[in-house]
Amino acid sequence: MNNEKGLTLIELLAAVAVSGILLSVVFLLIHSEQKQFTSRIASHNDRNAINRTMNLITADLSNSSKIFVTGNELRYKAGPKLKSLYYTDGQLISYDFSNDANAANDDADFANASISVTGSPQKYTASAIIAQNLNQAPSYRYNNNPIASILQNGELIQITIAFGGSPASVQTTSVKLISNATTK
């Protein structure tokens, strides 16, 4: 019976085992590529969010004539409007500031550190989340020192923001306030 055609049970089991190993390798390669692709997309999205945030802040502040920092908040005058960037719970939120229908007290409110989002919410309107997933409050500096007073008319400030994500990213930008602006 040496001329019988067909496969023995051992040959069949060997073929199934080799096929299983090859399919496992192919599956692992596909899974690895999928993880890398997902990681690249997440990294790309993080970079886009970082660039968008830094560009928004730079554009807004470069049109500002004065700024004031108090706690986790940066207040600035952009044209006739007073605005606020407020950090809380990993988010950077933009507000229109001092919209209490009393323009006479706007300058006093602007530099009043006791006014806050939680203590005087009526002064903060038109909120918009600028950034999420921040590791800490942004750092605002002038001449490499924390900003401790009102700055205006052409001063150069540095803004550093630590974004979360994988890996975390710290971004710094410099913004020059408008020179010789007429301040209210």
Image (cartoon, rainbow, N blue to C red):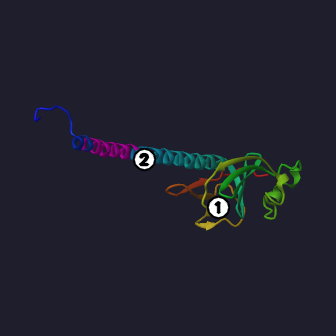
Residue 157: give x, y in percent of width and height.
Answer: 61, 58
Q: Residue at x 32, y 44 (%)?
A: 20
> Viewed as shown, does residue 53 lie left or right of 74?
left
Q: Is residue 22 magenta?
A: yes
- Judged by its main secondary structure, the magenta piece is helix
Q: Quadrant of the N terminus?
A: top left
The foreground one among 26 and 181 is 26
Residue for point 49% across, 48% down: 43
User: Residue 115, image x and y in percent?
Assistant: 81, 61
Q: Secondary structure at mark 2?
A: helix
Mark 1: few, some, or many residues within 10 Å (few <14, many ≥20)? many
* 101 falls in the magenta region: no
Magenta residues (range): 14-30
Image location of residue 172, percent across then percent down: 55, 57
Could you give the CA–CA distance between mark 1 and mark 2, rounded to whole angstroms? Answer: 31 Å
Give coordinates of residue 153: x percent, y percent. 68, 55
Could you say which is closer to the camera, residue 2 or residue 66? 2
Q: With respect to residue 115, does 55 lie above or below?
A: above
Residue 137: give its label: 1
List the residue tagged with mark 2.
Answer: 36
Q: Amino acid at mark 1?
A: Ala
The foreground one among 174 and 55 is: 55
In the rendered view, tell whether residue 39 sits above or below residue 157.
Answer: above
Mark positioned earlier in the residue sequence (1 or 2): 2
